[in-house]
Amino acid sequence: MDSHAWDDRYRTADLVWGSGPNRWVAGECADLPPGRALDLAAGEGRNGIWLAERGWRVTAVDFSRVALDRGRTLAAALPAPVSDRLTWIEADLRTAVPAEEGAYDLVLVAYLHLPADQRRAVLTAAARALAPGGTLLVVGHDTTNLTEGTGGPQDPAVLFTPEDLLADLADHGLTTVAAERRHRTAGPSGDPDREAVDALVRLHRPE
């Protein structure tokens, strides 16, 4: 799907993914000390806004102008100290990742599904953007979700496993904190009688 298709999808609902942060993002990041964060494929900004509310300075990047405009609108309703900590950037991560190398204490890549070569390029840029002592968190629909779960993309070429992510990031000097499959109740597009299967990898750059 290109940016125009995602624009159309975001126009279909006030908040496609809901207002609160993704459960895995909240669980993995709640105890991190605030710093500078990069939220890649930020969508309407639910994770970035949650981080900003916790004191993070967040750069949220997405290629959907509709999603970013909605994020800006949501942020504008927040107290100024929170909204001022958010920067919104329109960019297609398939062609360039607008990030300073070694500048971010947290880099988040949540539910970005691309063919493997494009995914590796984004994750390489994400790893390079990570500061010493920083955390890289990648989460998305696991490959096994096609047969064992529900919802999410139905093209196996854009799905991945924790092992795929570790292979993508093997040469960047990062330490693995977690690499696992996690199950959750299905979202609005899934079968309520089945659980979705996600892949999650959390890595740390040594100081």
Image (cartoon, rainbow, N blue to C red):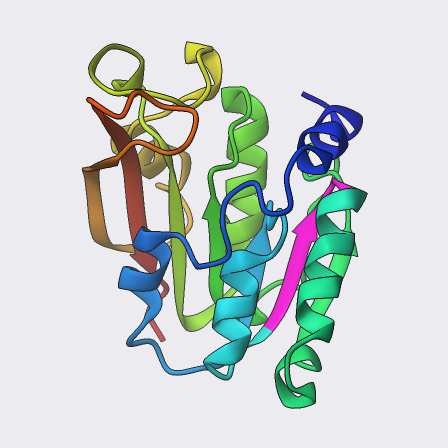
Q: Measured from the top left, where is residue 109 in percent x and y?
A: 49, 47
Q: Measured from the top left, where is residue 146 in percent x and y?
A: 31, 13
Displayed quadrant of residue 33 = bottom left
Q: Is residue 174 visible?
A: no
Q: How many marks?
A: 0
Which residue is drawn at the image coordinates 67% and 20% (left, top)? 1
Which residue is drawn at the image coordinates 59% and 27% (left, top)? 118
Q: Measured from the top left, where is residue 18 in percent x and y?
A: 49, 49
Q: Is residue 91 above or below residue 174?
A: above
Side of 95 where 174 appears, left or right: left
Reply yes or no: does residue 62 show up in magenta. yes
Residue range (magenta): 58-64
Q: Nearer the viewer, residue 37 or 20?
A: 20
Which residue is drawn at the image coordinates 64% and 79% (left, top)? 78
Side of 136 where 79 appears, left or right: right
Q: Is residue 119 above or below residue 58?
A: above
Image quadrant in which the C terminus is located = bottom left
Q: Measured from the top left, where is residue 7 in percent x and y?
A: 75, 34
Q: Is residue 110 visible?
A: yes
Which residue is drawn at the image coordinates 35% and 41% (left, top)? 170
Q: Of helix, strand and loop, which mostly describes the magenta segment? A: strand
Q: Is residue 203 above or below residue 166?
A: below
Reply yes or no: does residue 176 show up in magenta. no
